[in-house]
Image: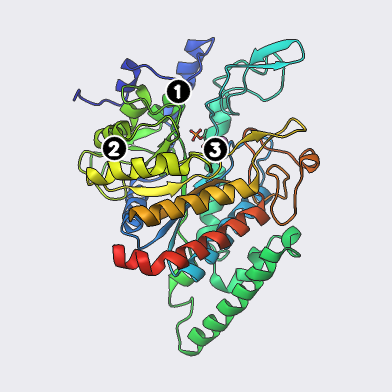
Amino acid sequence: MKKWKINSWRNYPVKHIPSYEDEKELNMVLNKIKNFPPLVFAGETRHLKQQLAEVVDGKAFLLQGGDCAESFAEFNPDNIRDYFKLILQMSLVLTYSASLPVVKLGRIAGQFSKPRSSPVEKQGNKVLPTYLGDNINSIEFNEKARKPDPKRLFKAYSQAASTLNLLRAFCHGGFADLKKVHLWNLGYINKSPQAKKFKELEDKIADALAFMDACGITSEFNRRLKTVNFWTSHEALLLPFEECMTRIDSTTGEYHDTSAHFVWIGDRTRQLNGGHVEFCRGIENPIGIKCGPTSKPDEIVKICNVINPKNEKGKITLISRFGYEQVEKFLPKLIRGIKKEGLNVIWSCDPMHGNTIKSATGFKTRPFNNVLKEVKNVFAVHQSEGSYAGGLHIEMTGQDVTECIGGAQKISDRDLSSRYHTHCDPRLNANQALELAFLISDEIKKNSNYYRKAI
Ligand code: PEP
Ligand code: CO
């Protein structure tokens, strides 16, 4: 194996990285960012890896979620707060009902760049380069807007930094205190069946806390009752940016990509001999690998070996995204391939990316029922293969959007246009995301005896 360097990925073919008109300007921007502070600290990344090792062992569950693509337009404190409320609610549902700690990992504070299925977009007779994410070009449909602009990287970095700053404050400043669970509700979902179920859970938690209070176990003495750990992640797609955020940790001499705690390789860029795999093999961060219908088990095994030669637990998360009808066809073979080699991985399920369709009204959408079906099918396959379904990877928002059809609000094709705000793929709204959390906690409960025996 050739020696890894921070820029050795440049010697390999890479897909989905834009070319910039003005290379000099790009290099000027990257050189500046190289001197900006890291967004995360290496010690935090190591801590996350330890928590992920617990997931590999079936002692915790991984919840990873957020926007498909963060945008400059949707950036405001209320959106971050509502997103965080929803993550806390989903985690509580999972922790309480499944009696498992939940590792909370956001697709946030840096999830901008997108691989797109077509390099061009057509509107009427006009054809322009595709939108690639707010840190690259603009979603507006005109020639100037669609040109990759290096200056956008500054704005994205600063948005990521202040998003993370607010999230850190929420985690440790009292917002996440279990006693404040009633404040995590999102006003607009008050009347849904999920909100009713969540209220019942809140009451049970209040009873448990009152009992613990009486025993002298209060959040004043136990930090864990009033703070949470929350980690960030995004797709490591735009390698020039990831490269300049990669730094040597002075305490260990290891390389860490300090743009997020966890990064993943997308389904379109996981070529064994491509630049994305090359870049990811040299950094210490935990790495996700998306596995879609075109992934071959022996290729995924090879990628795992290249990225995780020591078979360290918590290093690799395989994120399956086959589409609900294709789970049985592809997942068992992948599980068997990984098991045969004795590789330590987290099995996470992305029920979003294999279930995207175009609605009759012309919107990219996902039928919520198919999302649920993929999750159910994935759990069933893991149960029959004797592996632990340890994670969920979803696109979701705390906003009351109408982007995925179905769910308790019965969003129909015709409703999509009312609040369709995503910059890329359709997200679950809070109702749908909570419904999914309840479903998963039931699945985990159903299988818990089995898992405890298997592990
Ligand atoms: C994504 O997670 O937004 C994405 C593009 O996924 P995938 O690589 O699985 O298609
Ligand atoms: Co997406």
* Image: 198 above or below 164: below
Which mark lies nearer to you, 1 or 2? 2
The amino acid pointed to by label 1 is Leu
3D distance between C-alphas at marks 1 and 2: 30 Å
- Give the SS element for disc 3: loop
The residue at 50%/70% (across/down) is 96
Q: Is 445 drawn above or below residue 403 in the view shown? A: below
Callout 2: few (<14), some (14-19), or many (20+) C-alpha neighbours within 10 Å? many
Q: Is residue 260 visible?
A: no
Labels 1 and 2: the sequence-earlier one: 1
Quarter of the rendering occupied by the N terminus: top left
Please report whichever mark, 1 or 3, sits nearer to the chain's N-terminal start.
1
Identified by mark 2, the residue type is: Cys
Which quadrant does the C terminus fall into?
A: bottom left
Q: Real-space Cα distance between discs 2 and 3?
A: 22 Å
Of badges 1 and 3, the one in the foreground is 3
- Name the kind of residue labelled 3 in the image: His
Q: Image check: 54 left or right of 118?
A: left
Q: Which residue is mark 1?
A: 30
Q: Is mark 3 within 8 Å of ligand 1?
A: yes
How busy is the neighbourhood of tag 3: few (under 14 within 10 Å), some, or many (20 plus)? many
Residue 198's label in the rendered image is none
Q: Look at mark 3 in the image and give the residue it sits on.
A: 353
- Where is residue 404 shown, x and y percent of the image? 68, 44
Residue 375 x/y as whole percent: 51, 51
Q: Residues within 10 Å of mark 1 (few under 14, many from 20)?
A: many
Tell us which disc is closer to us: 2 or 3. 3
Residue placed under numbered mark 2 in the picture: 304
In percent of width and height, residue 413 lies at 76, 40
Give the CA separation, mark 1 to mark 3.
31 Å
